[in-house]
Amino acid sequence: MPQTLFQKVWDRHVIRAAEGATLLFIDRHLIHEVTSPQAFDGLRLAGRKVRRPELTYATVDHNVPTENQLDIRDPLSRRQVEVLRANCREFGVSLLDIQSGRQGIVHVIGPELGLTLPGLTIVCGDSHTSTHGAFGALAFGIGTSEVEHVLATQTLWQGARPKSLGIEVTGTLGSGLEPKDIILAIIRKIGTGGATGQVIEYYGPAIEALSMEGRMTICNMSIEAGARAGMIAPDDVTFDYIARGSRPYAPKGATLDAAIRDWKTLRTDDSSAFDRRITIDAGSLVPQVTWGTTPAMTVDITGVVPNPEDVPFASPDDARRALEYMGLTPGTPVEQIPVDLVFIGSCTNGRIEDLRTAASIFRGRKTAPGVRAMIVPGSEQVRMQAEAEGLDRIFTQAGAEWRQSGCSMCLGMNPDKLTPKQRSASTSNRNFEGRQGPGGRTHLVSPAMAAAAAVTGHFTDVRHLV
Amino acid sequence: MEPFVTHRGRLALLDWTDVNTDLIIPARYLKRIERTGFGPLLFADKRYAPGGAPEIDDPERHGPENPEFPLNDPALKDATILVVGRNFGCGSSREHAVWAVQQAGFRAVIAPVPGEGFADIFESNAFNNGLLVIELPQADWEMIAKASHTAPGRAEATIDLRQQKITIEPVDGIPAASLAFQVPESQRHRLLHGLDAIAETMAHEPEIDRYERSAPEWSLPSGVA
């Protein structure tokens, strides 16, 4: 029987399956400071150890200030970072700390370090773990009780094998369009719960044409459609990414050759193996902008703010609450919505290619009067690469801020926050109420669209600027 | 984990779809490193009047409640069964959302419809903490939502996990009703007996050892094999 990529990776990791419950082996466990303290406490209380510390890697990202990483002024943030350091020491877990040169957002550094590989199971106490699926890994977010379970046993209980959802992306992305537009268009089409209980595989010519960075952007937001995970079959683009650069934990030499032979079998045999399939045409997309408080509340840049009666996947009451929170009136052209702040970064769009794209829009232009633009590299490696390419100078000459790496304004756990009613164009992944700070109003866009909003002061069709 | 066998309690309704975990508990409260104290933080940015959200390190210190927020109806003070809209708990994986719901006094959450009521990670987190999450067919969910809406603070139900049955008590002309539900068998077993998943897994250690010995060399991080 033909199998999907997901089914192959799942089946390889089954230790035990009975009565609808499956015990899966976990190849990589990534940890950050926010969702792990209670898990380590649980181990201590029960007198348990970390079973495989050499498969467990930690970093600090959510609480880290991006103006000066060393200056954590909030005592609660500092405590959380220090607790992780102490836990890593006590349990023998490697920590990619500030000043190691390898710190960064957990989903940016996993691939950089060569920890993320095709065919692995990867978990982290963080929903955007789906990012790593871009390599053909089965990667998903877990809760703190599960973090404790993986620390203690290197395994995880799951239900029966989830269903497979095949999303074929045909055509070619037009100029000014980005992977972010593809994933926003997908969520808009299937809804925030459209893939609940399912694992998505993205495939088709528009996916194959993407770099690893672009594939990561797409898999990253699978969770925003409710998916358990998102995956893309590994190919030469994947193998090249793993083989090049400084990836200390990636296989090398003969081991890498053997790995690639194995990885080449990680493909969906036949699209009939998917439980469900949908298709979208990348060639017909225009830049996407979210208007509301879920990532499915999305319109074309050429569109208008919708009437509450016309919002898919939301009741008119839900839509009215979203409009009120966002301070928007139905019928307003999206291009007329002004922005106060532009945030370019996060595990969705904080990689080198995202910064290159943003820089291409900023080059020779200035941020509009009254607009603050923050450019936050996803990792210290990305920061150093961008500086080596001179991208930092393009940003600062345009009047944007060039910062250090961390989760930054994707969520309100560090000093980078929106103030109430402040409106952002953000390359992050969630436009939920209060996500970027209580009362803040978030519009999700691609890095190119964010840069375009920064230089014009309102949402702008970036196709006119490229 | 506290076992869940049967529970009779009052119903509270929050009829919003896509209630995400940032709404259930805003990210700043995730700076807490304890597993307790999350009750007052449930819906912190909705539940209190502007400026009144609790202190991160002292959740009992907060301002007055926002009377507009549906769960602040004084009649719902003792509610223990939360009735919610579709895709509850979407977004972030934070288990703190489950701790907040539980520590605010809820033993069970009921959403429509099978397969779409709860986000996947929230559902796993709930089962791992003994919070029973139930997905009902739309018509059944509407029945329980209607009872909650019509008789706030007086509508009650009994949940029997052994029988997988909810009994809505008659109230204000709404007749009694019995609704069937299903949770995965392995989760039901753990919940009924309050089992510790880690201890259960450790009983399978020889199988884990065997699996580990068969792992290909490339699957280990380079330099640590």
Image (cartoon, rainbow, N blue to C red):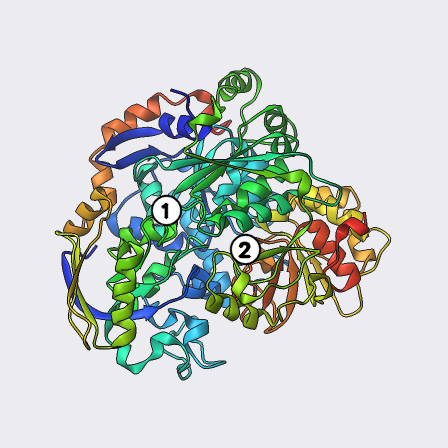
Assign the C terminus of chain B to one quadrant of the image. top left
Residue drawn 42% across the image and 43% down it? A228
**Chain letter of disc 1 in the image:** A
- The label number, if any, that marks residue B18 in the structure image: none
Q: Report helix, strand or loop for mark 1.
A: helix
Q: CA distance from mark 2 to mark 1?
A: 27 Å
Q: Which residue is tagged 2? A: A295
| Residue type pointed to by label 2 | Pro
Q: Residue A218: name its quadrant.
A: top right
Residue A148 image position (x, y, % from top left): 33, 47
- Do the residues at pointers 2 and 1 share their chain? yes
State whether residue A379 appears in this view.
no
Residue drawn 50% across the image and 62% down it? A77
Residue A466 image position (x, y, % from top left): 81, 47
Q: Residues within 10 Å of mark 2 (few under 14, many from 20)?
A: many
Q: Residue A456: name its quadrant.
A: bottom right
Q: Which residue is tagged 1? A: A147
Mark toward the viewer: 2 or 1: 2
Residue drawn 21% across the image and 35% down it? A19
Q: Earlier in the sequence, mark 2 or mark 1?
A: 1
Assign the N terminus of chain B to one quadrant of the image. bottom left
Residue A94 image position (x, y, % from top left): 47, 41
| Residue type pointed to by label 1 | Val
